[in-house]
Image: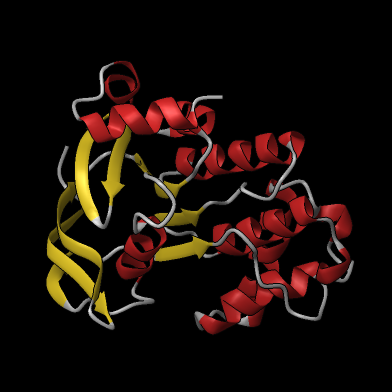
Amino acid sequence: MAAWLELDRLGLHESGTHIVEDVTLSLSAPRTVVLGPNGAGKSTLLRLIHGLLHPSNGALRWPRPLSQAMVFQRPAMLRTTAIANVIYGLKLRGHGANVRERRAVAALDHVGLAHLAQRPARLLSGGEQQRVALARAWALEPELLILDEPTASLDPASTREVERIVGEIAGAGARILMTTHNLGQARRMADEIVFIDRGRIVEQTPAEQFFSTPRTEAAQRFLQEEAP
């Protein structure tokens, strides 16, 4: 598969600390999950890729620019309705009123929240708010969806629903790049695993191979420690 993103010795340093260091990667899989211990640099790496942080050194190379959307562990909800939250994202991208309304309605329907479109978003449950965030991302029709621990604070039922929605977004053609601490989720959702430890890439392996025969001691230790 042709790469959709290449990272060349990417790094981020703050106050003399190397948060991400010399990351060289070629990403081509449809669904990539980034794993690693707490503080390994997973979230920072995703923010660098999405452009929320600027690298201290190195480069990101996009063979073709991809439209992107990102969903975080704790979604920020505006003090307005669920549908207005979705419309706002479309407005920022410059879409006209008719397009905004049509896409927002369709996106909320996709995530199963059409009946709550007029409910104040901040009064929704945590799982419902995350689905609004996914609807907001889906309405943008991203070619790359970046997810940072999207189910870390959710119960099992809400987690399954988020996984279903992400699967449908992937099925519509979006590439998926995500972090998670849930190894079962990584097994279910990943085509490829990128394992990062102390800011450095340790392994990049097809998911099935990573979970059956990790190549490095760091990955083996991580799987043992994180196993339920």
What's the residue at 35%, 54% (across, down)? 40
Residue 221, image x, y percentages: 34, 30
Q: Quadrant of the C terminus?
A: top right
Find residue 137 and report its image quarter: bottom right
Left or right of 30? Residue 23 is left
Residue 192, image x, y percentages: 30, 34
User: Could one spot residue 179 in this view of the protein?
Assistant: yes
Q: How many marks?
A: 0
As drawn, 217 above or below 31: above
Residue 102, image x, y percentages: 68, 65
Left or right of 52? Residue 97 is right
What's the residue at 46%, 33% (across, down)? 186
Q: Quadrant of the N terminus?
A: top left
The residue positioned farthest toward the top in the image shown: 212
Q: Observer-nearest residue: 4 or 35?
A: 35
Find residue 160 and report its image quarter: top right
As drawn, 108 above or below 28: below
As drawn, 202 above or below 7: above
Q: Observer-nearest residue: 104 or 78?
A: 78
What's the residue at 26%, 17% (across, down)? 213
User: Could one spot residue 191 in this view of the protein?
Assistant: no
Q: Observer-nearest residue: 108 or 162?
A: 162
Residue 28, image x, y percentages: 22, 43
What's the residue at 31%, 63% (across, down)? 66
Q: Observer-nearest residue: 28 or 48?
A: 48
Left or right of 72? Residue 101 is right
Find residue 65 and report its image quarter: bottom left
